[in-house]
Image (cartoon, rainbow, N blue to C red):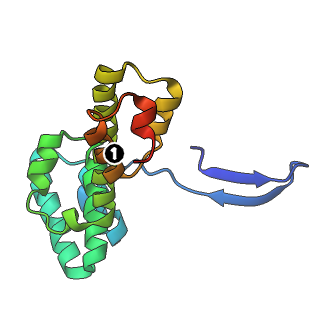
Amino acid sequence: MTGLLQHRLPDDLIYQEFRYNVVRIWERQADEILAGGLATLPLAPLARVKENELPAVIHAMQERLDREATKNQAETLWTATYLLMGLKYSDELIDRLLEGVQNMEESVTYQKILKKGRAEEAKRILKRQGSKRFGKPEPLIEAAIDAIADLDRLEQLSDRVLEVAGWEELLAHP
């Protein structure tokens, strides 16, 4: 974080140099971020802002996005806001603040995050149910389960736990 990035050839000759300024978002005023480009709006709640000022920040973001962003852009930016706010605020506060935000749930990115979370939970449940029935899975079995990304497949496997005799039979294609 020196403000200088240099790329060098093997003989140590600099072939590219890039200078930058480090910006600590938490030291900036929210108004400064809100006045910037659309892509920086998700950073506004992380700026130097008191918790009781957050509703006004979210409202200002909503007004800008309603005026200047396409539907897809707004969905993406609200999803980014939701994720970034998780670095600083509680789930309850975030949910309360973003409750009125429209279109975030329709965001492809948001849906992907939810789907991944559901798949991880399905894997956890499958391993738990299978362990009660068949015993702790061997590392290869556990790795095979962890490699499954398809939520439908994981749900099918959970349904089959009561119908098969062991881990190998469970993971064999029906």
Q: Indicate the secondary structure of the residue bearing disc 1.
A: helix
User: Could you tell me which residue is drawn at 31 percent across and 66 percent down?
Assistant: 108
User: Could you tell me which residue is drawn at 88 percent across and 49 percent down?
Assistant: 10
Position of residue 65 relative to residue 1, above or below, is: below
Task: From the viewer's side, name the closer residue of 50 and 157.
Answer: 157
Location of the N terminus by quadrant is top right
Res 106 visible: yes
User: Can you give x and y, in whole percent of width and height, for residue 42 in the image?
Assistant: 29, 59
Q: Amino acid at mark 1?
A: Leu
Position of residue 139 relative to residue 71, above or below, is: above
User: Could you tell me which residue is drawn at 26 percent across and 33 percent down?
Assistant: 162
Task: From the viewer's side, name the closer residue of 61 and 130.
Answer: 130
> Is residue 21 left or right of 29 when viewed as pictured?
right
Q: Quadrant of residue 17?
A: bottom right
Task: From the viewer's side, name the closer residue of 60 and 159.
Answer: 159
> Is residue 14 left or right of 18 when viewed as pictured?
right
User: Can you give x and y, in whole percent of width and height, for residue 25 in the image?
Assistant: 36, 50
User: Can you give x and y, in whole percent of width and height, for residue 104 in the image?
Assistant: 21, 64
Res 53 visible: no
- Check disc 1 and report the residue beneath it: 154
Image mark count: 1
User: Could you tell me which residue is drawn at 8 percent across and 50 percent down?
Assistant: 96
Position of residue 136 relative to residue 8, above or below, is: above
Position of residue 133 relative to residue 37, above or below, is: above
User: Can you give x and y, in whole percent of width and height, for residue 23 in the image?
Assistant: 44, 51
Dot 1 surroundings within 10 Å: few (below 14), some, or many (20 or more)? many
